[in-house]
Amino acid sequence: MLRPPGDTKPLVATSILLQRLHDEIPPDRFTLGWLMHSLHKRSFGIITLLLALVAIAPGLSIVAGVLLMIPAFQMITGSTAPVFPRRIAAHPLPTKYLAAVLQRSVPVLRYLEHLVHPR
């Protein structure tokens, strides 16, 4: 991750950020707006990762693929953070799916972060 010159704050590992997200997730439903707000500057990368993981599921792949096109286009245009249409950003989604994706991805990310640590 590239940082602007003069930025000396240590980077928080993505696995730690996702673990915090998992611990703070609303109990019943969440929205993409809440997710983007919770992820701050890393929202593009992590939303892309989460949508790509969701796209693996057979029934959800079309919806996740369409949603994946939105932040991809915004990255191409140079946006600093993803912006979804209000209807999509405010649509409640079941927490159990996000919790399952986070629960499975955190250990994998910890392992990868251990292998590919900053040098």
Image: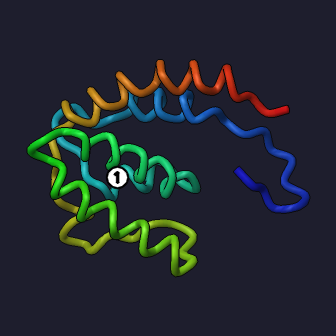
Question: In this view, which residue lies farthest toward the right?
Answer: 6
Whether residue 67 is situated above or below residue 34 in the rendered picture = below
Task: Name the residue rendered at 64%, 26% in the picture.
Answer: 113
Residue at (57% x, 70% y) in the render:
80
Q: According to the image, label 1 marks what residue?
A: 34
Q: Indicate the amino acid at tag 1.
A: Trp
66 shown above or below 19: below
Query: What kind of element bears circle 1?
Result: helix
In the image, residue 61 above or below residue 53: below
Seen from the viewer's position, the closer of residues 95 and 68 is 68
User: Where residue 73 appears, x then y in whole percent?
Assistant: 42, 74
Residue visible at 75% across and 55% down? 2
Name above or below for residue 80 compared with residue 7. Answer: below
Residue nearest the observer in this picture, 54 or 91: 54
In the image, taking residue 71 as reference, residue 91 lies left or right, namely left
User: Residue farthest to the left?
Assistant: 59
Which quarter of the figure has residue 97?
top left
